[in-house]
Amino acid sequence: MSRTGILVVSATESEAAHVPDGVDVVVTGIGKVAAAVAVTRALASYPADRLPLVVNIGTAGALHTHHTGLYLPSAVVNHDISSTVLRSLGYPVRDVIELDDGDGSVLATGDSFISDAEVRDALATRADLVDMEGFAVAFACAELGARCRLAKHVSDQADDSALDWPSQVDASARVLGAWLRDLR
């Protein structure tokens, strides 16, 4: 049960390293499946009428070179599902989730670690940032009726610089921790 009314969700312990004391944290593991299961399990432990605000913090790759710093996406897209094909076959697919209190940016989520400039440039036509968990967290929250916010800090340019992620994550975690202190 959250003491603050906030449940912080992070893919890795390193991204959550600077979350303020007294805030409940769930470390999901990397990827959409792990994130969806962990968030669902965590929210199931709350009474349905007292669900916390779920705040997914983490790093993201910038899909445009001018993107740096902290972002609060207004929408998140599931970029690696074949939405167009599935819809053409008559199957509805929810591949975009709008989020309250965002800054106008769009986050693309997929299970692929984006470190290729050509792939990045293709994604840049649809989004500003890329990660591996945001859509799954937002989807689980939407299905269970919990409010959700995403806070992503740019750690790389979603090109070969992404391979240096381990050395960048602590700087991002510090910015995210400071943002959470201000949120409370």
Image (cartoon, grey):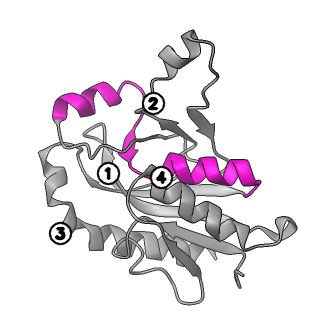
C-alpha separation, residue under disc 3 versus residue under disc 2: 30 Å
Eye-nearest disc, 4 or 1? 4
Which numbered disc, 3 or 4, marks the residue closer to the eye? Answer: 4
Instruction: Classify residue 116 by image quadrant.
Output: top left
Sooner in the amino-acid sequence: mark 1 or mark 2: 1
Marks 4 and 1: CB-CB under 8 Å? no
Q: Residue at x 38, y 80 (%)?
A: 17
Q: Image quadrant for the N terminus?
A: bottom right
Residue 157: image location, x then y, percent: 23, 46
Q: Which marked residue is nearer to the observer: mark 1 or mark 2?
A: 2
Residue 169 screen position, x and y as percent: 27, 68
Q: Which residue is mark 3?
A: 167
Q: Earlier in the sequence, mark 4 or mark 1?
A: 4
Give the CA distance from mark 1 to mark 3: 16 Å
Question: How far from the left and from the top, in percent, is residue 180?
Answer: 54, 73
Quarter of the image with the C terminus is bottom right
Badge 3 or badge 2: first in the primary sequence = 2
Which label number is shown at residue 33?
4
In the image, which residues are magenta? 117-146
Q: Against 152, is 107 above or below?
A: above
Q: Residue at x 46, y 59 (%)?
A: 34
Give the number of the disc on residue 81: 2
**Residue at (48% x, 36% y) in the render:** 78
Label 1 sits on residue:
68
Label 2's element?
A: loop
The answer for how far apart the CA atoms under marks 2 and 4 are is 13 Å
- Whether residues under marks 3 and 4 lie with C-beta atoms below 8 angstroms apart, the answer is no
Position of residue 162 in the picture relative to residue 181 (left or right): left
Q: Looking at the image, which is closer to me, 155 or 12?
A: 12
Q: Is residue 162 above or below residue 174?
A: above
